[in-house]
Each structure stands twice: as C-alpha cells, then as structure tokens.
Image (cartoon, rainbow, N blue to C red):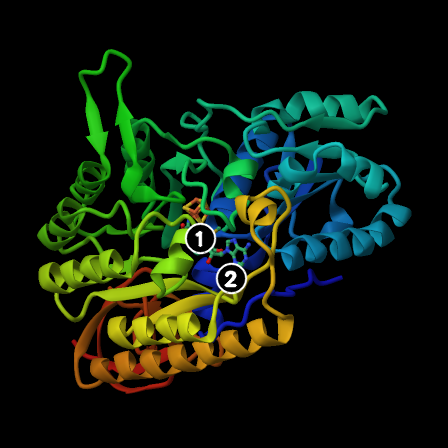
Amino acid sequence: MEPIVDLDFIDNRTPEQAAAAACDTHVTKETNTGKSRKLYIESYGCAMNFSDSEIVSSIMFEQGFDTTSDIADADVVFLNTCSIREKAEQTVRNRLGQINYHKKKNPGMVVGVLGCMAERLKKTLLDEEKIVDLVVGPDAYRDLPNLINEVDGGQKAVNVLLSREETYADINPIRLNSNGVSAFISIMRGCDNMCSFCVVPFTRGRERSRDAHSIVREAEALVAQGYKEVTLLGQNVDSYKWASEDGTDKVNFAQLLEMVALLSTDLRVRFSTSHPKDITDEVLYTMKKYDNICKYIHLPAQSGNSRVLELMNRTYDREWYINRVDAIRNILGEDCGISSDMIAGFCTETEEEHQDTLSLMDYVQYDYSYMFFYSERPGTLAARKLEDDIPLEVKKRRLDEIIQKQRETSLNRNKRDIGKVHRVLVENFSKKSDEQLSGRNDQNKVVIFDKKHYKKGDYVNVFVHDCSVGTLFGEAVD
Ligand code: SAM
Ligand code: SF4
C-alpha cells in the first residue's frame, strides 16, 4: 500500500520544490547489507524530521537492522511524526489505521511512533492507538536498542525524556533522504523562542547547538563521498552558538557558515530556517564573501501586521522585518532569493491586518512561501491565552488570497530570471521526461533543461528562456 501524502497546506510550487523543504512524507530506502531484521520508516513534516530518521536508521543499523522501502517486508515500522498542525497528527492516525492491515498479516511486526507527536501525546498514544508498541521522543533515539528489546520481550515501551545536551553529534547518519548530491546536516536542536502558535518548543525541547567541529567533519565526509550540496538545519540557525567546554573555542552561525564554505569551492552551502529577529549583517556579509554559499534565505514573516506579530510573540514588528529585508537587498542585491512562512487567520486578526500581510508580500516580492491557516495546538501560549475566533471559512479565504498573492510574486520573480544564465546543480531527471534534467539554481529555484551529455551531480550553466509560477525552463550552454 502506498503511503498517504495528505498535506494540510496549499502549496503553489512544483513537487520538486515542495519535496525539498515543506511538509511532506518520506519513506526509507533499501540498505540491504544482509542484516537479520528490516526497518521501515515513514517520516512526516519538516527537513529536521527527515534528518532525524537518518540518525534513527544509523542507531538501528548498529542494532542489526537494514532499512526497507516495502512495509510488507518490515519487522519494525516507525512513523516519525509531526505535530505542527492538527491535520498533520490526523494524517498519522489515519496511517496507523492502514498499518493495522499489515500488522494483522504479520502479527510480530513492531510499530513505533517517533518524533513530535510521540513527545506531545506520550503514553496516551499507547492507550489511544492499540496498534502502537513503542513511543519515542526526539531526544531519546539512543535508547531505541533498549526499547526494542523491551518490546521483543512482550512489553510496550515509552521514552519521551527531553534533554538539554543531546545533539547526536557523534552519530553518522545513514543518508536515506538523499539523491547522492545534496544532504541535510542538523546543526542544532530544539527551540527557545516560544512563538505563541507553535508546539515545537514543547515537542523538541530547549535549543542546543551541536559541536562545530563535528558539523565540519560531517560535511567533509560528504564531500569525500561526492556530495555537492549541504543544507545546515535548525529551527533558528542564526542563534547557533557553540563553545568548547573550557570556553576558548567559540563559533557563531556566520563563523560556522564560513568553516563549511571553506571545505570546497565545489560544495554548495544552504541553510534553514533564519529567524528575522536574529539574522545579522555578519551572516549576510559572510554569504556575500563566498560564492558557494547560496544566495537564498528562508525568512518566515508569519504576518505583516505588528499587532498580530506581537500576539504571535515573534519579538519583531513589521518595521524590523522590512529593515532585515532591506539589509538583504543592500548587501546581497535584488537577485537574492527570499521565501517566507505565512499564517492566515491567527487569533483576532482583522481584515485590515490581513491586508498588511498581503502588502508585506508586495513589498518583499517573495520567491515563494509556505502558507498555512492557523491551527490551534493544545498547550501552546495561544491556546491558553487567546481565542481561536476566526471562522474556518474566513481563514481559508484569507489563505487563498495569500496564495494568489504568492503566485503573482513568484511569477514576477521568475520572469526576472528569463534571459539570464544560471548555474544549476543537477539533482535528477525531470519528473516528466528522462530526456530532461532537473536541478536548482543558487536561489533554490527548480530549473528544467534538455539532458544532452549532463548527469546528476554536474554543475551546468543554463540559459533560462521561459518560466511558470514554480519552475524555470532553459537550455544548457557550454
Ligand atoms: N522555526 C521556524 C520559524 O520560526 O520560522 C518554523 C518552524 S515551523 C516547524 C514551520 C512553520 O509552520 C512555521 O513557520 C509556521 O508558519 C507554521 N506553523 C507553526 N505552528 C502553526 C500553527 N499552529 N498553525 C499554522 N501554522 C503553524
Ligand atoms: Fe516554532 Fe517560533 Fe521556534 Fe519557529 S522559532 S520553531 S515558529 S517557536
């Protein structure tokens, strides 16, 4: 049975772009190294979760598990889950219902729920979903071997302890989500920001930064294996701050970016997500200094209205956000790609305030955005203090207006790219034809062009002659 891909957001980009970073579903690839048991993982949500599944696979590999892409073949099935919106959790619950069908055929199959939903619901998941044997939070993956042993011994097992230190720095992830060209590197975990709508601080715990040298070693190993692009991941990469135990060695995000960029001029460096309150000019100048740091910034605004931003506890206002966008344009120029996350219909948002979001989008001219309507999450500051008072049909209508605005600005931005040569890193064949290749330019836009003699992993100069809302089309030039 195919995994369901039931997304609770409306996305105007191509499947290639959506797969790169938004809410999505990934299934483990086959490792087939002759281990005695097989693990199947389905990962939901954001890139952080996909990256975590690679850590989980590595821990399970040491415990005697190969990964499989066929659930019917699995001894252990993990769902690595997302709690960010109600629909994301519902998707997982529906999927557990489908997995029941496999468990009936194979009663020895172990079913585990990992990640944010495990952390949020803890032991109640075992009571509510009888099929589940194992519930494991995002900081407890090292305990998986013990937990699996408990389940093998006939018990149900739970570990949802959050940690202030765990960064899995020493674990060598098994690259499940990779096309062999680009890979994710997790540089920090958790979040200290307490945006009022957001469940992440509760499900992923306190912010901690990973040892900078272990990050550089991981990137170095990827370069040695032929990878051409790394994306440094964190909920708020600009607050990355690591210090050695004796305090003599200190690294901030701009310095980390530089350390990774210096590994190879052939390695593209990307990062996500930047928080508008923390992104510094130092980061922007570091991006400018190195050609191989991609000129693309994901800078979620969430709203264009200062009162709503205050209610969201984003700790910046419209003017601050515009100042940061102006700094990007001044330092990195008009061509730097900027994307956003937007929430429609947050508590008490008026029509005028919604218009402020649309006018901010006009001002910034985002290349694209991830767009959602507000979904109240139990336990968050907003759920405790604010009334979720915007009717669903109003939220949906406002979201639709935001999407239409984004289609307009994406098209404007893509039209600017016509008539120019773009350096494209080839990632795969185009979805529509094996005679065409698909890759991304510096600004993270998907570019499709005729294959000629080029292949996956090549850098190709492509002259762009046409575009749609989500894609650039061109011709390779030598
Ligand atoms: N750390 C990132 C930041 O602050 O920009 C975002 C991480 S969050 C996993 C991804 C996006 O989900 C958020 O930027 C926000 O737009 C959206 N989101 C989070 N909680 C939400 C909620 N309760 N309802 C709707 N969208 C939500
Ligand atoms: Fe959630 Fe805000 Fe942290 Fe992003 S910065 S993960 S939106 S609390």
Q: Is residue 442 above or below residue 413?
A: above
Residue sitting farthest toward the top? 246
Image x and y of residue 229, in percent: 31, 52
Answer with left or right where residue 130 lies relative to residue 16: right
Q: Give me the C-alpha separation between circle 1 and circle 2.
A: 9 Å
Is residue 470 something one can see in this rendering? no
Q: Amino acid at mark 1?
A: Leu
Instruction: Examine the rendered structure and indicate whether residue 145 appears above or below residue 127.
Output: above
Question: Is residue 424 found left or right of 334 in the rendered image?
Answer: right
What element does badge 1 sit on? helix
Q: Quadrant of residue 326?
A: bottom left
Position of residue 149 measured from the top left corner of the image (x, y, whole percent): 74, 22
The residue lying at 53 percent from left, 44 percent from top is: 381
Confirm or deny contact between disc 1 and disc 2 (CB under 8 A).
yes
Residue 180: horizontal and vertical position, in percent?
41, 53
Q: Disc 1 marks which residue?
A: 311
Relative depth, front residue between 209 and 310: 310
Q: Is residue 382 left or right of residue 360?
A: right
Q: Residues within 10 Å of mark 1 (few under 14, many from 20)?
A: many
| Mark 2 C-beta to ligand 1 under 8 Å | no
Residue at image location 45% in from the left, 65% down from the top:
370
Residue 266 in the image: x percent, y percent? 20, 52
Residue in the foreground of this view, choosing between 394 and 72 = 394
For badge 2, the amino acid type reads Phe
Seen from the viewer's position, the closer of residues 423 and 119 is: 119
Is residue 204 among what the camera can see?
Answer: yes
In the picture of the structure, the residue carrying the numbered disc 2 is 346
First along the sequence among labels 1 and 2? 1
**Element on which disc 2 rests:** loop
